[in-house]
Amino acid sequence: MKIGLTTRLFLAVLATAAFAVVAMGVAAHWSYSRGFVGYLNEQAMVRVDEALPRLAEAWRRDRSWQPLADRRTWFHALRGTDPADTTRRGGREVSDLTGALLRFTLLDAERQFVVGYEQTHEDTVRRPIVVDGRTVGWLLMAPFQTVSGAGELRFQRSQLLSSWAIGAVCVGLAAVIAGWFARRLLQPVRRIADATHRLAAGEYGSRVAVGADDDVGRLAADFNTLADTLQRNEQMRRAFLADVSHELRTPLGILHGELEALEDGVHALSPASVKSLQAEVATMNKLVNDLYDLSLADVGALAYHRGPVDVGDLLQQTVDAFGSRAAEAGLALSVALPDAPLPVLADERRLQQLFNNLMDNALRYTDRGGRLQVQAALRREGSAEEVEVEVADSAPGVPGDQLERLFERFYRIEASRSRAGGGAGLGLAISRSIVQAHGGQIEARPSPLGGLSMRVRLPALPAPALPAAGAAA
């Protein structure tokens, strides 16, 4: 039989409470027994101290212990009462509540037994009876070892029964409180466990209510955050598969159609048809390479060979390479670079890939007749210097709530954008990976020209690093 967490917690709390009650009961019983016996012995010593002058007076009066040999006279002497007084309690002897008088023994001066308790022990208390400076007898008292009197036993039993009754009530209350506590505490935990089972079964929309701001509440909040992340990742996975299949299906369809046309003789094999086929192959090859780079970036395996690089020179080469494309698209391209070098420690090939992606993105999404502006400068942030690169374009712009999403894979402002107008949506995701790998930052924000501005910041190297690197080469 499998015991649930609620039952185990209930039994644990109940067992702890029961153990505490039993331990307290046993300790109280032991302490009471020891303390009560001590109390009886203390009271007996008080009786001894009270009896000594009475016995001395009796010996002084009779000059002998013989009259006290009678047990009734003996007890009256110990109590200090008159044997002839029959008015006290109807003539009956007054009992001693502690029973100590029954354990007194009288010895004469030669330590011979006269009257009283006949058994003596090593721990028997002995007190001399002195009259006019001479010891005329001895008063002995056998101390209590255990509670033996009927009254004492009844009192002890009543205390013991009361203690166990109180303990039973405490255990019952502990059981009620433990049951309530177990259900109260574990109810939200059980909800989280049920939601976890649904989440493991693929129900990524499972959520739990966040109650109090305690450990369980924070656990519920963390579970909801985990569920949100898994749901978002599942949506991204599905979108990824759909986008990849779409991006591959289009060029493959074109290739298939062109090859069938050539095979059927509809089209003749010409430089134009070969160029069209090569363009589709290049498109698929770029998509596969981009996906491969992203997969390497995800596991931190994207190779970087860092060295001193002049961002100004590299950016100028990129602008020159895209100049003809900008002219064909009817875009005015301007560049603003400083005369001084802009050195950074970077992988030149990856940095070139970054700038190519930024320029390609700007050319694709800028209306004809617009403007592209590329600029770079050395900025100081506190005690550190940074190289800042900005690629800005004119209309159309991007809504502010979608700027951060531009770096997501396969994300496009218009989901139905045709391949002729846009790429696969991987360039900016790769760009962010490259910038982060170099310890920099990249952000998208509205451009003063009316479109989009992509700003990159990279840690700068001291200016002498470039000449030294060139000399070493």
Image (spheres, rainbow, N blue to C red):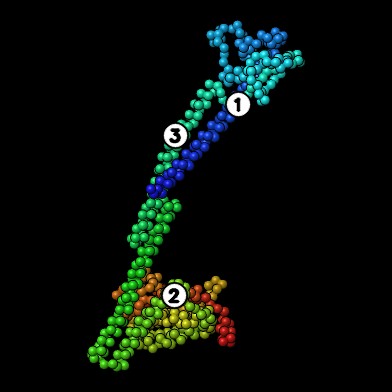
Q: Residue 421 location, x and y as percent?
A: 32, 80
Figure check: 387 above or below 225: below
Q: Which of marks 3 and 2 is nearer the N terminus?
A: 3
Q: Nearer the viewer, residue 470 or 392?
A: 470
Q: Residue 321 location, x and y as percent?
A: 42, 87
Query: Which mark identifies residue 169?
Result: 3
Question: Mark 2 against mark 1, which lies toward the viewer?
Answer: 1
Q: Which of 452 and 321 is in front in this view?
A: 321
Figure check: 142 above or below 233: above
Q: What residue is shown with label 1? A: 145
Q: What residue is shown with label 2? A: 296
Badge 3 density bin: few <14, some 14–19, many ≥20, Cα 10 Å: few
Q: Residue at x 76, y 15 (%)?
A: 134
Q: How far apart are marks 3 and 2 (CA)?
A: 68 Å
Q: Residue 26 location, x and y as percent?
A: 53, 34
Q: Nearer the viewer, residue 362 or 346?
A: 346
Q: How far apart are marks 2 and 1 (CA)?
A: 87 Å
Q: Which residue is drawn at 44% across and 81% down?
A: 353
Question: Mark 1 against mark 3, which lies toward the viewer?
Answer: 1
Query: Which mark identifies residue 244?
Result: none
